[in-house]
Amino acid sequence: MSAAGVSLDTSVLLRLLVAQPVDQFRVAIGFLQAQRANHVSVHVGDLVLAEGYFALLSFYRFSKPDALAALSQFVEHSGVTVSPAARDSLALPGLATAQPGFVDRLIHGTAHSSGHTLVSFEKAAKKLPSTLVLATAG
């Protein structure tokens, strides 16, 4: 394994979040614990968080607040690293009903951390710094 660490994919993240199937959960939690014990950095990327969020909503039938709470608690207590945009977004009070929502905030955070202005048609994006909202004539 890389000295720089490891990154979890969505399949591992979901096993850790929902503990199903049990055999895969046991392997995933054992792996995570072993990495932490060996001081290996474990990262979860924004795309994995977004895909995990949508899987919790659509496949596992979590409510938005429950899906966001599961992700937030996992990030807070598991010892994994995430991007600053993900950490800030998950810490936002009322995120389940916020506009822009979780995934839009991840997209904005990636653009902003790269020094880019985010360009969007989403009116709610006006609330975010370094964002240009395009308007149509109609």
Image (cartoon, rainbow, N blue to C red):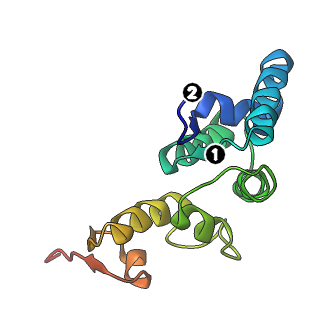
Residue 1 disc label: 2
Q: Is residue 68 above or below residue 5?
A: below
Give the camera-side residue of 51 and 87. 87
Say if mark 2 contacts mark 1, CB within 8 Å.
no
Q: Is residue 27 left or right of residue 55?
A: right
Residue 51 disc label: none
Give the mark count. Answer: 2
Q: Is residue 115 left or right of residue 82?
A: left
* Quadrant into which the C terminus falls: bottom left
Q: Residue at x 55, y 37 (%)?
A: 3
What is the secondary structure assignment of the residue under circle 1? loop
Q: Residue at x 48, y 45 (%)?
A: 47
- Outermost top residue: 23
Residue corresponding to mark 1: 41
Which amino acid, mark 1? Ser
- Residue 67: percent from left, percent from top: 72, 51
Q: Residue at x 73, y 39 (%)?
A: 61
- Outermost left residue: 137
For disc 1, the neighbor class at 10 Å (few under 14, some 14 to 19, many from 20) is some
Q: Is residue 17 left or right of residue 96?
A: right
> Which quarter of the picture shows residue 62?
top right
Q: Residue at x 83, y 30 (%)?
A: 19
- Residue 133: percent from left, percent from top: 27, 77
- Residue 70: percent from left, percent from top: 77, 51
- Residue 91: percent from left, percent from top: 68, 71
For disc 2, the neighbor class at 10 Å (few under 14, some 14 to 19, many from 20) is few
Give the camera-side residue of 83 and 68. 83
Give the camera-side residue of 108 and 62. 108
Give the camera-side residue of 115 and 65. 115
